[in-house]
Amino acid sequence: MNAPFQPAAIPVAALADAPADAPAHGRERKMPLTVLIAAPRGFCAGVDRAIEIVERAIERYGAPVYVRHEIVHNRFVVDTLKAKGAVFVEELDCVPDGAPVIFSAHGVPKSVPAEAIRRELDWLDATCPLVSKVHRQAERQIEAGRHIVFIGHAGHPEVIGTFGQVPEGAMTLVETVADVAKLDLPADLPLAFLTQTTLSVDDTHQIIAALRERFPQIVGPKAEDICYATSNRQAAVKKVAPGSDLVLVIGAPNSSNSMRLVEVAERCGTPARLVQRGADIDPAWLEGVSTLGLTAGASAPEQLVREVLDTLGEWREVEEHTIITAEEKMVFKLPRQLVD
């Protein structure tokens, strides 16, 4: 373990000319730290909606309310909802008969609500509407007779949910430009592409360009599938990172959009670290850092941003500057069952 970081003291020689009534703690004055706080950051409309669905369901049905998978990828959020009466399970097999159950914001295969209906469970779908839009696009492309090349990360819940909207074998996953070169598809096969909503904007553009070059007949969505919140948070990091010595991204390691923010900062030439909350910060990271960039993934609450700033303030004299690159006013409707 690294030795604890010690704030630099003002040299004794510099104190010689200090006024006699200068405060004694001046000898231990903290070094300044400028923090550039990215905006937008943190919760997006889809995450706000998903959390509100769980909270309203608990109020409506009483505890416990079951949630299939993490409602969003953030341990603090999950633990907070657990304390209110939510029970998180991996599969519907773990949900008792007659209990209410909620599907996570990442979306689920069609087989999941079908099983809930078969068991006559009272279920609510917290899938982000922008993910649901991709699901509908996938269905339309299959109806049009096209094979889908899906750009995403293998094993991510959103990818699993989207693949579960179409017949097996109707969709092929690619993660990189190199994967495009390896595709073994007939040259005359009708094709379409869709993407996960939380990808790197720059990487995705490169993959789409490679697909269009190799398969000129491929059809894409009218508007990109990467959601507004993912794009906005990456653009904000691109503004903050070049002027920072270090960027901290608040988010979970299984959060795709948070991990992409780390990558964006590093591509700007700035070291970046992912932290889940203030306690994860090693004060040794601040050595040689005079300006720090700070952002939060779309699943991280603003409470954790303040916690990180308070933690930094224990070691340094923090001066906060918010860098605004866009304003977000998106709001998604709740399921009808919870609107009464």
Image: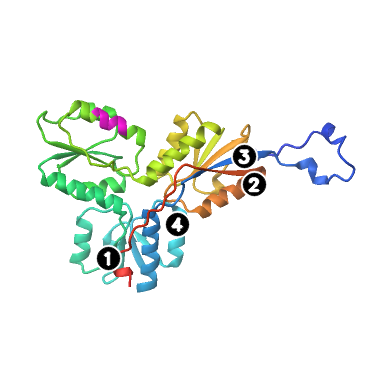
Q: Do the residues labelled 4 and 3 touch (CB within 8 Å)?
A: no
Bounds of the magenta segment: 205-210
Question: Of circles 4 and 3, which is in front?
Answer: 3
Distance between the Cα atoms at labels 4 and 1?
21 Å
Distance between the Cα atoms at labels 2 and 4?
24 Å
**Dot 3 crowding, Cα within 10 Å, few <14, some 14–19, many 20+:** some
For marks 4 and 1, the one nearer the N-term is 4
Distance between the Cα atoms at labels 4 and 3?
28 Å
Residue identifier under label 3: 34
Q: Are marks 2 and 4 in contact (CB under 8 Å)?
A: no
Q: Are marks 3 and 1 in contact (CB under 8 Å)?
A: no
- What secondary structure is found at the residue carrying circle 4? helix
Distance between the Cα atoms at labels 2 and 3?
11 Å
Q: From what the image shows, is residue 113 above or below residue 163?
A: below
Distance between the Cα atoms at labels 3 and 1?
47 Å
Residue identifier under label 1: 123
Count numbered badges in the picture.
4
Residue identifier under label 4: 77
Residue 159 quadrant: top left
Residue identifier under label 2: 313
Amino acid beneath label 2: Gly
Does the magenta run of residues contain 231?
A: no
